[in-house]
Image: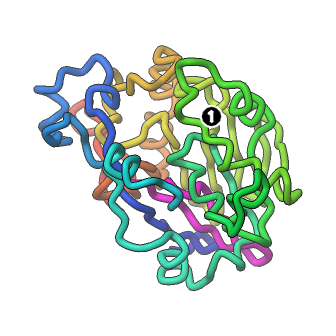
Amino acid sequence: MRLSDYRVEVIPDAELKLDGGAMFGVVPRVVWERECPADSSNRIRMAMNCVFIETPSDRILIETGIGEKWSPRQIEMYGIERTRPLADSLREIAGCGPEDITIVVNTHLHFDHAGGNTVPGPGSGPNEAFLPQFPNARYLVSKSELDHAEAPHERDRASYLAENWRPMIASGQLEMMPDDYEVVPGLRLMTERGHSETMQTWRLDRGGETMYGFADLIPMKAHLRLPWIAGFDLYPVETLEFKRRILPLAAAENWLCLFYHDIKTPLCRLTVVQDKMEAIPV
């Protein structure tokens, strides 16, 4: 896909399964399972849709998926199903390898968004067990998010794994950014309180088109309904206010919308049909 002089590609990583009740909060199972069928453990299938952006000067990857550092027990627990490594998907779809990426952007450092930042290394020491997967890239994350990741609380501690960012601190590749910043002309990161205190969404404006990544504020198309908010969200009322503010704008301006966890159609445009927000696959 071209947005003026930028090329944009969706790079799918593995699938995972999380508890459906946790993903839909106060919505009863009998309602949400019509759209997201659950397995015998009440888990629903979810994707991780990373985004590659090629500009005249940079090759950017937004999010890196869940990574490939999991034990057999963890793979079973999270229902991780991988068709191929993220690096192979990047080569197949974008035509470049990890060594060609110049900028990695993390909206936040939860393991299903930043797990592919690193790969297993040859040694077992603190700076040898894991290495940056993108050896020539600058890794960008907000300072606020990094500070929280280093000192998480009981509600989200399990989502932060230090091996997904500390190797880049050691290598000098990690750059701490403001709460709102521009990566390259037209690509901006904005901190939006809801899923957490410090998670960011992203917006790309180029050639009269807007592409918007909701990250975990609206993880799947099913979450377009205003009250359908994940139980994981630390500030659900703020998530609700975000949806009330951003969704009418996205529909009115015909944005391309990226649903990071949607298993079938991650890239859509929005329209309102009989007062109901609907996603139209691109």
Q: Nearer the viewer, residue 27 or 155?
A: 155
Q: Position of residue 117 (x, y in %)?
A: 64, 58
Expressed as whole percent of the image width and height from the top left, the position of residue 234 reads 52, 19
Secondary-structure class at tag 1? loop
**Which one is nearer the viewer's eye here, 213 or 138?**
138
Residue shown at the point (82%, 37%) measured from the top left: 178
Side (left or right) of 128 relative to 18: right
The correct choice, above or below, for 119 with respect to 179 in the image is below
Q: Main secondary structure of the magenta part?
A: strand
Q: How many marks do you count on the picture?
A: 1
Residue placed under numbered mark 1 in the picture? 199
**Which residue lies at the image location 85% right of the left edge and 59% below the top edge?**
171
Q: Is residue 274 above or below residue 266?
A: above
Residue at 60% across, 74% down: 7
| Image quadrant occupied by the C terminus | bottom left
Specify whether residue 51 is painted magenta. yes
Which portion, as a residue range, is magenta? Answer: 47-66
Q: Residue at x 58, y 27 (%)?
A: 157
Q: Residues within 10 Å of mark 1 (few under 14, many from 20)?
A: many
The reply to whether residue 46 is visible in this rendering is no
Q: Is residue 14 left or right of residue 170?
A: left
Q: Quadrant of residue 4?
A: bottom right
Question: Residue 165: image x %, image y %?
Answer: 72, 48
